[in-house]
Image (cartoon, rainbow, N blue to C red):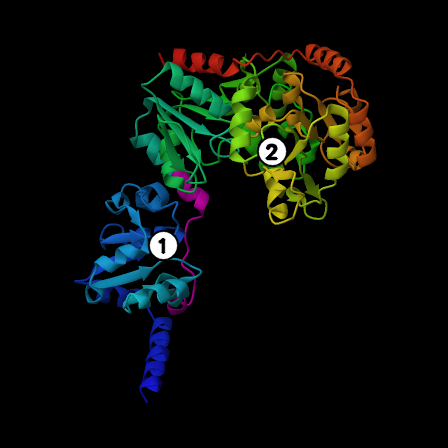
Amino acid sequence: MMKETRKDSRVQNHQDRKNQRWEDFERAVTGKKLILIGAGARLGRYLKKYGDSCESACVIDNDEAKQGLLLDEIVPEAFGLKEGKKKISDISTIKSYDAEEIVVLITIKNGYETIIAQLERFGIHHFFIQTIMEENTRCQMKKKITQKDDMTVRREYAEACCLHEPIHDKKIFFSAYADYTDHGKYITEALLKIREDLDIVWVVYNLKTEVPAGVRKVYGRNWKRFIYEMETAKIWVLDLATPDYIIKRPQQLYLQTKHWASITLKKFYLDAKTFESVPEKIENWKRDGELIDYIITGSDFDTDSCRRGFGFQKEALQYGSPRSDALFREKENRDKVYEYYHLAKEKMSVIYAPTYRFDKARGKNVHESRNIELDFWTVKNALEKRFGGEWHILMRLHPSVAMAFKDVKMPEFVTDVSSYGDSQELVSAADIMISDFSSIMFEPAFVKKPVFLFAMDLQDYLENEYELLIPYEELPFPIAEANEELAERILEFDLEIYRKNVEAFLERYGVHEDGRASERVAAFISEYLS
């Protein structure tokens, strides 16, 4: 009989949950301590509704990366509220409260049954589920509540920042294609060597991203803090276009670094017919080109292609490629990468870095996941026969397609390094590169390392993907369209002839990297701020 009663109770509790409404929550929380679980988008909606009027005792999230951070670092709507200064803790915190004195609001969309099971193990049965209450509110009103679209809300907040928030004269805002990396990383490190008075802000999307002392991280999904930090910074250093909703004030300086080095293979942005079918991108690049004050370039060729690609007519700072400074720190980077991946130090390594392809069925906005066409054993055997020793193969896939190969089993001498934060450190650590159409191919050449090109779909790429700025056959690298052909190119490789070809090529395009580009950019920024 007791078992049946317990079962009936569970059914009743489930039925009660299905009928929860906000007015029930407001009555229940009166005189109780409120515990919020889930520091995400739904909690943001709750804060828009209640603000500080319904103060919580604590905020909990099961994501370890969020634990210990302030709520306003993660949730945009918490920014500017007292609630925003609460630290996010783990579920065990709830044990310090009397179950009869608390009410729990579960703000996550999926997986709340797991949270409920955790709470019931702690003897807590008084909880509300935001997803259910929102759905019941919609049903009660028989229509969805009309809200402003996200872009309008963000634009209005950016306007408010410009009206009411001063620009901080020592603040520099960095944002890159990936987290702390690319040109901005090396400019930051050069700045830290010459200035101690700067507020350097970096946008990250992985909360575990490590940054040096003297750098402040801002969570990129917290749009409110993102906008606040950007609108109040004196200088922006970006390698992608500014978001549509951002407003640039006359007192602000915008440095565009782009996310490639001093020479690139493919036409890009406004110079590329590739994107004619994506007018919204074209409009954003046009707008961005007008906002940019300076572009960092590394040659006349680079400057000219940036003028066309960005629609940019102001001054270019032809200082070189800051991220390519890494190529001149080979021993340091080799030790770092080999230790990180537990690679045998006596072995040599080749990095395989192919780029993405567009999904022909879904259009130029979508990248397709492709099979790895490189025959690892054939390449390894050819390398060992030509250069001697034993070899590691480091596989660096473009972020757009890397996830497709996360669980693919590879030979033990192949290491997937796609998730490693800094591709230039990988290039610097490796002895040789194999690529296809990625402009990363030029960076090992800056220090005369061998580069081989391998593209089984060469003709299809030239006809259906990007237009090239440099004819493929004029590149100074051995080219192969099949694995057997690649092995032949490796076996017949002549280092002396290769180096002469590379030197002549770089001279023709006016590329002269020396490992000090980031110092020059940092000096420019420092002088500007002074």
Question: Is residue 141 part of the magenta span, yes or no?
Answer: yes
Q: Residue furthest bottom?
A: 1
Q: Is residue 379 placed above or below 146 in the rendered structure?
A: above
For the residue carrying disc 1, how many other residues have a C-alpha within 10 Å: few (<14), some (14-19), or many (20+)?
many
User: Given the image, on which type of amino acid does mark 2 rest?
Assistant: Ile
Evaluate whether residue 184 shows in this view: yes
Q: Residue at x 77, y 30 (%)?
A: 382
Q: Residue at x 64, y 21 (%)?
A: 444
Q: Report the residue marked by disc 1.
A: 38
Mark 1 vs mark 2, CA separation in Å: 38 Å
The image's mark for residue 319 is none
1 or 2: mark nearer the eye: 1
The stretch of residues the image draws in magenta is 138-156
- Could you say where residue 457 lies in the image, as x and y percent from the top left? 78, 37
- Could you say where residue 304 lies in the image, as x and y percent from the top left? 64, 16
The image's mark for residue 282 is 2
Question: Is residue 294 part of the magenta span, yes or no?
Answer: no
Q: Is residue 106 placed above or below 407 in the rendered structure?
A: below
Closer to the camera, 163 or 349? 349
Say whether disc 1 or disc 2 marks the residue closer to the N-terminus: 1
The picture quadrant where one finds residue 107 is bottom left
Q: Is residue 54 placed above or below 343 in the rendered structure?
A: below
- Could you say where residue 303 lies in the image, as x and y percent from the top left? 61, 16
The picture quadrant where one finds residue 493 is top right
Q: Judging from the image, what secondary structure is the residue with disc 2 in? A: helix
Q: Residue at x 39, y 42 (%)?
A: 222
Q: Is residue 392 placed above or below 528 in the rendered structure?
A: below
- Could you say where residue 117 lies in the image, as x and y percent from the top left? 37, 67
Q: Judging from the image, what secondary structure is the residue with disc 1 in? A: loop
User: Given the image, on which type of amino acid does mark 1 rest?
Assistant: Gly
